[in-house]
Amino acid sequence: MTYRRSRTGNPHPHVLPDYQALLDDTDWASLATVRGTGESLPTVLALIINPDPAVSAAATDDALREVTHQNTIYEATVPVALYVAAILNHPAIAADDFGHDADTPPHRPTLVRLLEWLSDTAYDADDECVAIGERHFGKGFLDEDREMRAFRDQRPAIFSAVHSLLSHDNADVRDAALVAAIPLAEHPVLTAHRAELTDHARRLLATSTDRHNRDRVLDAMKAWGHSTSALENADDIAARERYARLKAERDSGWAADGTGGYSEEPPF
């Protein structure tokens, strides 16, 4: 894996690089992706900031597809993540239409899609995934998985861009930014932000019905030592009980067939 200026694409992990510098200075063709190398990524990534929302949305799907498969962090994932973070506040992304006409299907803004991908990727490299990897593959797991380690090193830079969207005018953007910020804030230099994120979490729980987002926020608050009983609604309680029941059934099934299956899936 080689880069023209930096092996990670960012010699200063706490500083977000300029998006154009990332396109120009990264040796994309040398980086592994889902289906080969990232030779085509610069062209596709550049189209994400095309002023035509349809072009931008299609390019977003094409680019992220190259680094999204089975919870794996690829060599190209880190520069793609840095580029995505660097364009979150680009005028072309900010100008996307967050409303929709009653006669047309709801439009999913590119900004929300980019935040959701950053969130999913951050969870694929979070502390829980590292702990699972170490249980299955030993304490040297993170030393061997250089791509995951590289992403984790860049969390402060990515967080700096996500943080600015926590107070966005659009609720979908605010919620997506919060869910992305939570796993990023596991980095030691970001833990001081957890009090602020908790305030945003309480707001989300008071306003959102999205099951995925509520689960992520409730899990984070519990992990940070907050009581959530007063914040849970009937659906939250039902979901928690359903998850516990499914886990018990799964664990019981593995014990009964004597296969010695994992108690959780490895982070891949």
Image (cartoon, rainbow, N blue to C red):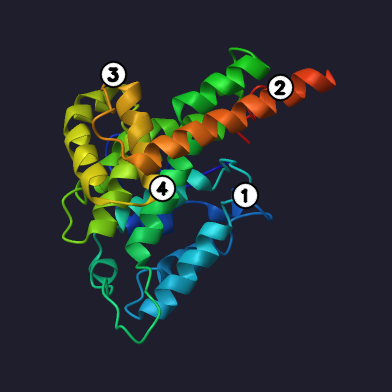
Position of residue 94 relative to residue 195, above or below, is: below
Above or below — where is 64 with respect to 195? Answer: below
- In the image, 20 versus 160, the foreground residue is 160
Q: Tell me, yes or no, if residue 31 can be seen here.
A: yes
Residue lying at 31% horizontally and 83% vertically, measured from the top left? 102
- Tell which of 106 and 254 is nearer to you: 254
User: Marks 4 and 1: which is nearer the front?
Assistant: 4
The alpha-carbon separation of the residues under discs 3 and 1 comes to 33 Å
Q: Amino acid at mark 2?
A: Ser
Q: On the image, numbered disc 2 is attached to which residue?
A: 252
> In screen coordinates, is 102 left or right of 5?
left
Q: Nearer the viewer, residue 167 or 55?
A: 167
Task: Indicate the position of residue 67 as horizontal and vertical percent values.
Answer: 56, 52
The three-letter code of the residue at mark 1 reads His
Is residue 155 at least partly visible in the picture?
no
Helix, strand, or loop for circle 4?
A: helix
Tell me the mark number nearer the camera, choosing from 3 and 1. Answer: 3
Q: Callout 1 environment at 10 Å: few (<14), some (14 to 19), or many (20+)?
A: some
Q: Earlier in the sequence, mark 2 or mark 4?
A: 4
- Tell me which numbered mark, 3 or 1, is placed earlier along the sequence: 1
Residue holding disc 3: 225
Which residue is identified by label 4?
211
Which quadrant of the view contains residue 253? top right
Instruction: Give the mark nearest the N terminus, 4 or 1.
Output: 1
Image position, residue 180 (x, y; %) = 35, 43
For label 1, the residue is: 69
Q: Please report contact status of discs 3 and 4: CB closer than 8 Å, yes or no.
A: no
Q: CA distance from mark 4 to mark 1?
A: 23 Å
Neighbor class of circle 4 (other Cα within 10 Å; few <14, some 14-19, many 20+) is few
In terms of secondary structure, where does tag 1 sit?
loop
Kind of residue at badge 4: Arg
Image-quadrant location for residue 38: bottom right
